Amino acid sequence: MPIDPKLNVVPFISVDHMMKLVLKVGIDTFLTELAAEIERDFRRWPIFDKTPRVGSHSQEGVIELMPTSDGTLYGFKYVNGHPKNTHQGRQTVTAFGVLSDVGNGYPLLLSEMTILTALRTAATSALAAKYLARPNSKTMAIIGNGAQSEFQARAFRALLGIQELRLFDIDASATRKCTRNLTGLGFNIVECGSVAEAVEGADIITTVTADKQFATILSDNHVGPGVHINAVGGDCPGKTEISKDVLLRSDIFVEYPPQTWIEGDIQQLPHSHPVTELWQVMTGDVAGRTGERQITMFDSVGFAIEDFSALRYVRDKITDLGMFIELDLLADPDEPRDLYGMLLRCEKKLELS
Amino acid sequence: MPIDPKLNVVPFISVDHMMKLVLKVGIDTFLTELAAEIERDFRRWPIFDKTPRVGSHSQEGVIELMPTSDGTLYGFKYVNGHPKNTHQGRQTVTAFGVLSDVGNGYPLLLSEMTILTALRTAATSALAAKYLARPNSKTMAIIGNGAQSEFQARAFRALLGIQELRLFDIDASATRKCTRNLTGLGFNIVECGSVAEAVEGADIITTVTADKQFATILSDNHVGPGVHINAVGGDCPGKTEISKDVLLRSDIFVEYPPQTWIEGDIQQLPHSHPVTELWQVMTGDVAGRTGERQITMFDSVGFAIEDFSALRYVRDKITDLGMFIELDLLADPDEPRDLYGMLLRCEKKLELS
């Protein structure tokens, strides 16, 4: 049997590689293709191994592992969420992930996922909105103009053609940064002084704030008929953004209910409250939006399958574009049962050198 | 506040680095110091976040994530178990792991753990035997002479002074390999033709076979009074080595009962059967061996805390010895909320170059 001479090696995509890969593919194309991969996996949702992410919570934040498998490939992501990190020059959320071969358990890819998560979160949001927002949607409010905001804007433009943005952040400098970063792409941007001003006339309201506490970013009076709410920021226990009154007026769509009940904005509701699984809308089993005046809400928390889709997509891309280095991650003795002998041979080599 | 200029970088210990590190420290010293680290963590067992490992099972094997935290550091290991891998020149078990800072969620270390797992498994076995085997133990039988066998031999010599080995494997070439690898270290080795022959006169019986099926490596008539059984190979659902009759005659010691009931040899017993947690023997809360004729058994499956100890130990070592490379794993934008801007700046740089 032919044996791969480099069984020890796992391709590694650094942050620098990921940026170059995204830019080479083009941000719009990347988001569009990635959304298509995610959609493809949502349409075969039942075949995946699913579990709520495994979190280790502390006062400062959370570290989570998010595994899933389709029976052929296995993927997991490591991700942290530490809201106070920005005060020390660190990211609130960083992540990396691994894709593996279910047949032999060997990793096929190790990748940075801070940037990739930002892209997959935005792609998933826009994908959900494609099914849930009114088809003639033109204007999106973005409440919270931090690290995820521009990715949301780009994804909604790439997938839905949204060009009118109304931005608000309690920190005006974040809004200015968002505007600056999105300049020159054909967006029509309005910087707003309040949530109320930002949601005025918006077809889609994206909430993507970062504080870990029960907050009410979006109140009942902010949400008119027909709006689609893309609730991204409420994504861990105790962290919510949307007032309960708004939830009660909305039809709520989620990724994986056992996880969303723990982490999403619906943690404010009794578990008897009806929610719809987004994948069932994509397969056509369940209706998404049914009328012009209906309020739809995607209570996004981020699920392992989206990361799985992203890792698989990236793996296919690097095969063409070669943007990775080889990591000596796996012990590969000449004789598989002879791990100890590998150590001895290394010793001999060191003695000779 | 001073900010680390290299927030993007995570030290990575490759397989090659790990081998050089182990050899530089010395295998005996490494095993002894590692066992001391594991013992230190077992003695403060209650403070750890504990969960049975999160497994993704397939027909071919299993991929598992093993997280834990002491509130200051967080660690997890990725490990696969695929018994048929050796037929394709691959390892049955490969692993890598990460140690992180609970305060900000940032990884502090990424390390190969195939070799490190072999060492920590052997160190834990010998550590358990230090508490459970008769103090005058001289002879160990090793049933199963694959990748883990030499590490077991080295650890039992380093920690307990065991020099008499009786080896058996259904594949005689595995036994010959084990003997060859252990030659010149002062062991007195007897290659045996059967389990019955190997266990003759042994004070300690180590079972470390790899087949994934309910097997009976060790039968009732193999086990005399006073013996300590170090059961290493029965470590996943459906995979056991020790006959139920032997279990019923033994006092059984385990790492983390919720995991061992799923994976250990005790999966053959009703959950009402008494088992003792090893850490309680180390703190002195519960007696270990109480008599010369008592049969003790360590039903080892490998728990996350052992990997945590190993990662912490390795991290302390590389600080002195510098055996790692720097991996560009974490996105580190100049302004933490400006992840998208980092992508734009990369674009500009590429245009200029």
Image (cartoon, coloured by chain):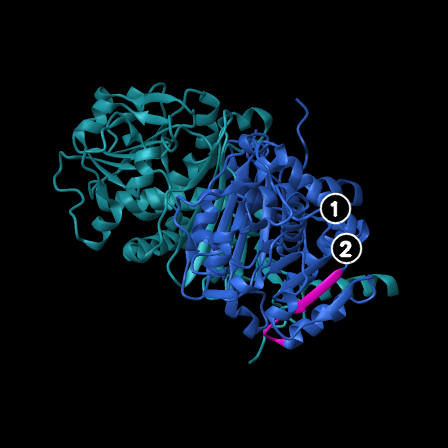
Chain colours: A blue, B cyan
- Magenta stretch bounds: A164-171
Residue B31 appears at what percent x and percent y?
Answer: 40, 50
Residue B87 appears at what percent x and percent y?
Answer: 56, 24
Of tags 2 and 1, the one toward the viewer is 1
Q: Quadrant of the N terminus of chain B?
A: bottom right
Query: In screen coordinates, is B130 left or right of B100?
Result: left
Verify whether residue B101 appears in magenta: no
Residue A103 appears at what percent x and percent y?
Answer: 57, 29
Furthest residue toward bottom: B1
In the image, is residue A61 above or below residue A11? below
The amino acid type of the residue labelled 2 equals Lys
In the image, is residue B213 above or below residue A155? above
The amino acid type of the residue labelled 1 equals Thr
Asked whether residue B26 appears in the rendered view, the answer is no
Q: Quadrant of residue A186?
A: bottom right
Residue position marked by numbered label 2 in the rendering: A20
**Residues packed near mark 1 inside 10 Å, few (<14), some (14 to 19) or many (20 plus):** many
- Chain bearing tag 2 is A
Q: Are marks 2 and 1 on the same chain?
A: yes
In the image, is residue A205 above or below residue A272? below
Of the pair A271 and A185, the residue shown nearer to us: A271
Query: In screen coordinates, is A175 left or right of B33?
Result: right
Q: Quadrant of residue B265?
A: top left
